[in-house]
Structures are given as structure tokens and as C-alpha cells.
Image (cartoon, coloured by chain):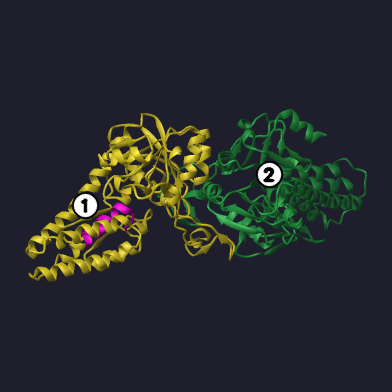
Chain colours: A green, B yellow
């Protein structure tokens, strides 16, 4: 992989400043917690798995120069750090999960010397990082088994290396297929309004020498009909117990178009994306975002002043449109609550 | 109608400079042929019917200060004018049709005095203008009969007043329904890459006080599923004998989504849009446009340098996805070559 979205250098959290992509590839060394906090807040680093890793390493950053030896004071310091980092972005579940793991380590080990706790916390952050890599690789391997030589695939938004510590989810399938020596090509939807497909996915795939063609979202149907698509892979933000999958707006559109054109449509997501407390996609709340994302390009208006806008950031693809969900445990094809629970908890 | 896309003032062709929309509404008085030619070339005036009218009035502009009385010299002057105007844009059929009508008038009346020919040419240009208005009104009336109070409609690109001398095609249906006192609302797709939906349709409908909501193209499926759409109206650039309709990219996407969500999908187009020499949509050539339309916003790149792009400007919606074609003769519901020919030539 030619992309190091996030890593610990020993004294800094090194990230790619994603706000500058695709025009510039700039690595930013966050040497203190405040710099990292700002980077999370301003979307310099993004993507649920990458945010979990950033949060964990944020704790490591915040204790690296800690000089005291009093464990209770150190525990309080770590808890304060976690509270602070937790305020950077309110919605990323992985960020809170990672902080809960870090906090738990010190809370449940109040008798360990500070030096030991520091080492354990760094090891835990590394473990979160490594687990994400392993999960990405496993999903990639399972998904890549679907790709045959000469196939043409399609993807939407950025479910790639830039959202994780490694391969990504949907794009990980392409990376694994390429490493396995398969020849295929990919159509990437630009993904309005924020163009993650154009800015991030096109950049990632190009950098990894995967044959990628960028299209506008409204061209997907025409490409399926006139060029032919063999497989579609998309990521997910939250998956209900029955397999209904919330993902970036436009994913449901792809699901419907895939059904009409008889193209198998796969979701690629790890166990942590499933929310088994939720029965169906109807219970997944859909965030509506600012009208300016649609009416402006940068500061330039592209629609009349005062125009009404509907800007849902996500949509839900019902399980009947999904051929399977590619997880680190394999591909779940029978999408019902019982089978999904069995696979994920076996 | 609050929009005067094009009209003859008596000594100038007054157009709306569409390149400045939606940020500024500026009328441009073209007082000589060169100014009008440049306005056509640079898309200040656009839309097939509007271009036909612009070409006809261009001839009127070019003869308005003609002082000679020798008819053969005048005929040559008019033919030269037509040749010149015909070089402004190569693909708009209406432009050439209008010029052929103007040229024909002088060629077939070589014995009339110059003063008479000048008057006849101006009357012909006015007739082309008026015919477009009448056709728009008729399509609008037929289409509006489909809209019932409380309905939610959807449209794509700009098939509106800004493309014609009056109502437009698809948007004419909305204007006629509003004038008939019906209450309804419209979702307008922004229409990437050139955003005619955001820049022109949203502006037109807003200006005519029609309840319009702007969405990105990839939100159409989600709106159909979650909000509910009752009717879809789109324009067309060329319709084959069997009713397959070429229109702005994304129209076919809407056709497939409409079928899945059981939403009646109508094309609105005058007789002049039908190309009865062409059997099916497969024979309609699809223009591919510059990658920069997709990879840049203005001068700012939004995709990585050197990325491969597929940018078809149009797609073809097969007749089986179309509930009917709204023409000036009524709504053609049985879309086969025989029935279409019967309706259009009766």
C-alpha cells in the first residue's frame, strides 16, 4: 500500500492532510494533542476506523512527556485526555470505542506504576491500529475472491485506505485483487456533494495503479447499460440486524440500478459497523447536512439564493438489493437477523 | 411567465445572458449580428428552440440597416448571413431549420422588392417565435392534465423557459399546472457536471414561484423511496421512431429508478424533436464531452491530475421505461413506430 493515512512515528501521529487532496499530498506530524484534535475537527483525518486509531494515539501523545509517578494522578490525566479528545467529533463511534478501551486500561489497573501504564497504553493503541489492518486485509481477501480477470467494477464515495489504517473496506477488495494478480478496472462515482469519490477514491486507486475511471453519479446507470458492470462494492456507516445498510447518499441508487441491470451489489464492512440493537434500516437516523454543500462550490454560489435544498448525507439500501456483506469473517449472503448474528458472534 | 429568454425589440435581439445565471439576471441587447453570433457561440443563449429563434432574428438584425434596392444582391446578402450564423454552433438542428426557412423565403421570391422581402423575413422570424410559444403552451396544457393537487414531481436538467421562447417543455408542464391553480411541488436534480438543474431550473421555478427543492442527482432514489414522487417530467434532445428518448445524462437513471418505485415517467418534447429516420435509441450517437467538466470546478481541480474520465453528455431512455411522451398533439402513450408516426403526421 502506497498510502499511510495514519501512523505513530514514536513521537508524533503522522497523518495525511486529506483536506489538501487530491491537489497536494502533505503529511502532518501531530506532535501534541491539540494539533491532533484540530486535525480531527477539521477533517484532515476522517473515516470511522482511522478516527478510532487517531483517538488512541492521541492518548499516547498526551502521556508521552508525562513525568509524574503518582498513579492516581496519572489515571485522572488519562481520563481528562480522553474527555478532551472525545469532544473533537461527536458522531464517530470508533472514536469513542477506542477512548473507552484506553480509559478502561488505566481505570482497571490502578495499582500499576505509571511507567508500566504508559507502555500498556501505547501497546493498546498499536493493537487498535494492527487490528484495523488485519480486519481490512481479511475483508479484502474475502471480497477479492469475487473478482475475476477482465471484470469491470464500480464503487461510490471513499471506503478506502484514507478511511482506515490500511486497505480500507470496499477499496480493500480492489487492493487485494490487484495483489493477487487479477486484471480488472473500476468506475468510481464522484459522490456529490462533497466529491469524496473524485477527490479521495480516484486519488487512492490511481496511486495504487488500479485502472480507474471517474464518472458523475448520474452516469452510473448509463455505464451499467452501455459498458457493463460485473460487480459493485460499497462501504457502510451502519448496518441493521437484518442487513439493511446505511452508507453515503447514492448507495441506495446504486442498489436499485444494480438490481435492474442484474449486477451483484456488495457491501464491505467489518463487524464493528453492525448495530445489532437496530432491527431494520428504518430505525437508522439519516443526517441532513447544510444546504451550502449543494448550493456552493467553495465560496462560489452555483444555485439561486434562497433556494430550498434537501441534503441527506446517507441513504439506506434494503437487504433485498444486497448480494452479500463482505466482513472479516467471510461473505454473509443470507441477510436475515438470525444468520447475521450467528456469523458475527461465532 | 416572468422570463424573457429571447425577444425582438424592434432593433435588437434581447437575450438573457445565461452564463451569468443564477448569480445575475442580465439582459443583453444584441444590436448587430456579430454580437448575437458571439452570444450563441459562448452559450449566453442556449436550448434548441431558443437557438432557432435566435438564428431567425439574427437574419432580421443583419438586414435591418440594408439600404440597397437590388433584389439579387439582397438575396446573396441574406444567404451569406445564413451561412455566417450557421457557423456559430454546429449541432443545433433548430438553428439550421430556422436558417433554411429564412433562406428559402428569399430564394423562392427573387422577383419581390427588397422592402417587401425585408418585411417578410421579419414576419417569418416572428412566426418561428410565435410557433415555439404555441407549441410550448400546448405541451404544457397536455402535461398539466396529469398533475393533481398535492402531488410531488421531479425533473432533471433544464427543459424550461430558458431553452425556448416561452414555457419550455418539461417545465412548461409545471407552469401550465400552476396557471391552472394546482398546488404541487417539484424536486429538481442539479444535473452534473454542468449543473443546469441548479443554475437554471431552480432559478426559473423559483422566479415563477413554484415550490422547488434542489437535490444532487444521487439523491433522487432516496427521495422517491422516502418522500415519494408522483410524476417525473424530462425533456428530450432526440427521440427515435420507437419512442426511445435521448436526453441529458441522468435521465435514463431516473427512468430506471422510476420503474423500481412505480413512478410514471414522462418525456415532454415537440414534434421537431422526433427523428423518424432513426429506428431505435441505439442509433442515436452520444456526444462525449471534455474530462475537465468533471475534474474541475471553474479552474479549480477537484480530482487527481491525469485521472481517466468518462463524460457522456446524454443517455437514452428506452421506450419501455416511459409512461408517455407529451407533445403538442397530446400525450403519446403507446410507444411504437406506427403509433408515433400516426400521431405526429395526422
Q: Chain of mark 2?
A: A
Residue closer to the observer: A214 or B245: B245
Q: Is residue A214 visible?
A: yes
| Residue A200 appears left or right of B330 | right
Instruction: Sort mark 1 into few (<14), some (14-19) or many (20+) by Cα contacts within 10 Å.
Output: many
What residue sits 77% from the left and 60% below the top?
A12
Q: Is residue A213 placed above or below B141 in the rendered structure? A: below
What separation in Å lies between label 1 and label 2 (alpha carbons)?
60 Å
Residue A65 is inside the magenta segment: no
| Residue situated in front as seen by the camera: A60 or B180 | B180
From the viewer's perspective, tell me whether residue A142 is left or right of residue B327: right
Location of residue A292 in the rendering, given as x and y in whole percent from the top left corner: 49, 49
The image position of residue A329, as x and y in percent, is 79, 41
Badge 2 element: loop
- Check if mark 1 and mark 2 are on a common chain: no
SS at mark 1? helix
Q: Tell me which corner region of the image, top left, top right, bottom left or bottom right, holds residue A97.
A: top right
* The one of A234 and A86 positioned closer to us in this rendering: A234
Instruction: Residue under label 1, please give it.
Output: B128
Residue range of the region highlighted in magenta in the rendering: B45-58
Q: Which residue is mark 2?
A: A92
Do callouts 1 and 2 mark residues in contact (Cβ within 8 Å)? no
Amino acid at each position: 500500500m502506497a498510502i499511510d493515512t495514519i501512523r505513530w512515528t514514536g513521537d508524533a501521529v503522522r497523518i495525511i492532510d486529506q483536506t489538501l487532496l487530491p491537489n497536494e499530498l502533505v503529511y502532518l506530524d501531530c506532535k501534541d494533542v491539540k494539533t491532533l484534535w484540530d486535525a480531527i475537527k477539521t477533517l484532515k483525518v476522517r473515516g470511522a476506523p482511522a478516527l478510532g486509531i487517531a483517538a488512541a494515539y492521541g492518548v499516547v501523545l498526551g502521556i508521552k512527556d508525562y513525568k509524574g509517578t503518582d498513579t492516581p494522578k496519572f489515571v485522572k490525566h488519562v481520563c481528562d485526555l480522553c474527555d478532551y479528545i472525545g469532544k473533537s467529533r461527536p458522531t464517530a463511534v470508533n472514536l469513542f470505542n477506542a477512548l473507552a478501551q484506553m480509559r478502561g486500561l488505566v481505570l482497571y489497573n490502578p495499582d500499576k506504576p505509571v511507567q508500566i501504564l504508559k507502555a500498556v497504553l501505547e501497546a493498546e493503541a498499536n493493537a487498535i491500529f494492527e487490528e484495523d489492518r488485519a480486519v481490512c486485509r481479511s475483508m479484502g481477501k474475502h471480497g477479492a475472491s469475487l473478482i475475476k480477470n477482465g471484470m469491470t467494477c464500480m464503487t461510490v464515495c471513499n471506503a478506502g485506505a484514507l478511511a482506515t489504517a490500511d486497505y480500507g473496506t470496499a477499496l480493500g477488495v480492489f487492493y487485494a485483487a490487484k495483489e493477487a494478480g487479477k486484471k480488472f478496472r473500476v468506475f468510481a462515482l464522484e459522490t456529490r456533494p462533497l466529491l469524496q469519490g473524485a477527490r479521495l477514491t480516484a486519488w487512492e486507486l490511481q496511486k495504487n495503479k488500479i485502472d480507474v475511471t471517474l464518472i458523475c453519479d448520474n452516469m452510473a446507470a448509463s455505464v451499467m447499460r452501455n459498458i457493463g458492470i460485473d460487480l459493485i462494492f460499497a462501504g457502510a456507516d451502519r448496518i441493521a440486524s437484518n442487513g439493511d445498510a446505511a452508507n453515503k447518499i447514492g448507495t441506495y441508487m446504486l442498489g436499485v440500478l444494480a438490481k435492474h441491470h442484474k449486477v451483484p451489489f456488495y457491501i464491505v464492512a467489518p463487524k464493528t459497523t453492525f448495530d445489532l440493537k437496530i432491527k431494520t434500516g428504518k430505525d437508522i437516523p439519516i443526517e441532513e447536512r447544510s444546504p451550502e454543500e449543494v448550493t456552493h462550490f467553495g465560496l462560489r454560489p452555483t444555485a439561486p439564493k434562497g433556494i430550498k435544498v434537501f441534503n441527506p448525507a446517507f441513504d439506506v439500501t434494503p437487504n433485498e438489493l444486497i448480494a452479500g456483506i463482505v466482513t472479516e469473517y467471510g461473505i454473509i449472503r443470507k441477510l436475515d437477523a438470525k444468520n447475521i448474528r450467528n456469523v458475527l458472534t461465532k
